[in-house]
Amino acid sequence: MNITKAIFKCSSERISQVPKDALCDIAFIGRSNVGKSSLINMLTQHNGLAKVSATPGKTRLINHFLINDNWYLVDLPGYGYARTSKQLRGSFAKIITDYIFKCEKMHFLFVLLDIRLEPQKIDLEFITLLGEHGIPFGLIFTKADKLSAAQRKHSIARYTATLSEQWEELPPYFISSSEKRIGREDILDFIEKCLAEGK
Ligand code: GTP
Ligand code: MG
């Protein structure tokens, strides 16, 4: 897929505020700082479209970006970042669960995972939740530029082995680097197929 147009549409504090048109959402979620906003900028080739920050918790709202006047790329708040003691680490904010479970626009969800880390409890909990609710999702391993080819392979094998303990069939997965522009075509081709199936 070729992205010829990418514009910021709106930020929503709750799902009643998301766009009310019939266009599909393809959403990105994952722990704070995993690289969601960077990936959105890399996919759209539009630096600065989504706000990137070295400080976790930058994206607090549901951000819709209109792509090719035809579908939305959605940047969701990160989970696992406890700003106040009230919000326990490991719990998922209501804005996130409302969006993924109640928003009819949501067509497909990419869960981003830092390729350097061993499987994290919070990510596995989130993936289990998606499975229990039958939410269609895939995985994107981010920051691949930080590892060698052999290390990447090892990390993916470790992850798929962990998931295989629970899942008969593994979700589709992709390897990416926003820094080195790895994975762009594969991810966009997958999104294209996803959107075509939904119509
Ligand atoms: P929140 O909005 O806080 O949830 O974070 P986020 O998941 O949107 O992460 P963001 O894109 O803001 O990136 C977090 C940090 O990781 C920034 O310092 C980025 O420059 C860095 N980063 C993101 N992607 C990559 C990547 O592919 N490679 C490298 N080396 N760094 C990356
Ligand atoms: Mg962000």
Image (cartoon, rainbow, N blue to C red):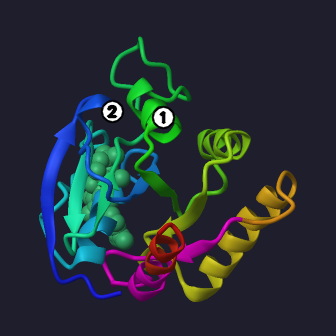
Tag 2's secondary structure? helix
Is 78 situated left or right of 163 in this image? left
Q: Is residue 150 above or below residue 68?
A: below
Picture mark count:
2
Residue 144 sits inside the magenta stretch? no
**Residue 2 shows in the view:** yes
Q: Badge 2 is on which residue?
A: 15
Name the residue rendered at 35%, 46% in the picture. 76
Residue at mark 1 to residue at mark 2: CA–CA distance: 8 Å
Q: Residues within 10 Å of mark 1 (few under 14, many from 20)?
A: few
Query: Could you tell me residue 53's position as x and y percent?
Result: 21, 52
Q: Which residues are magenta?
A: 171-190
Query: Could you tell me residue 1's position as x and y percent?
Result: 36, 87
- Residue 16 picture quarter: top left
Residue type at the position of mark 2: Ile
Name the residue rendered at 66%, 70% in the picture. 155
Question: Between 173 and 121, which is closer to the camera in this rendering?
Answer: 173
Residue 182 sits inside the magenta stretch? yes
Q: Is residue 84 above or below residue 144?
A: above
**Residue 80 shows in the view:** no
Is 20 situated left or right of 158 in this image? left
Ligand 1 positioned in quadrant: bottom left
Residue type at the position of mark 1: Lys
Tag 1's secondary structure? helix
- Residue 62 picture quarter: top left
Is 34 situated left or right of 70 in this image? right
Q: Badge 1 is on which residue?
A: 102
Q: Do tag 1 and tag 2 residues touch (Cβ < 8 Å)?
A: yes
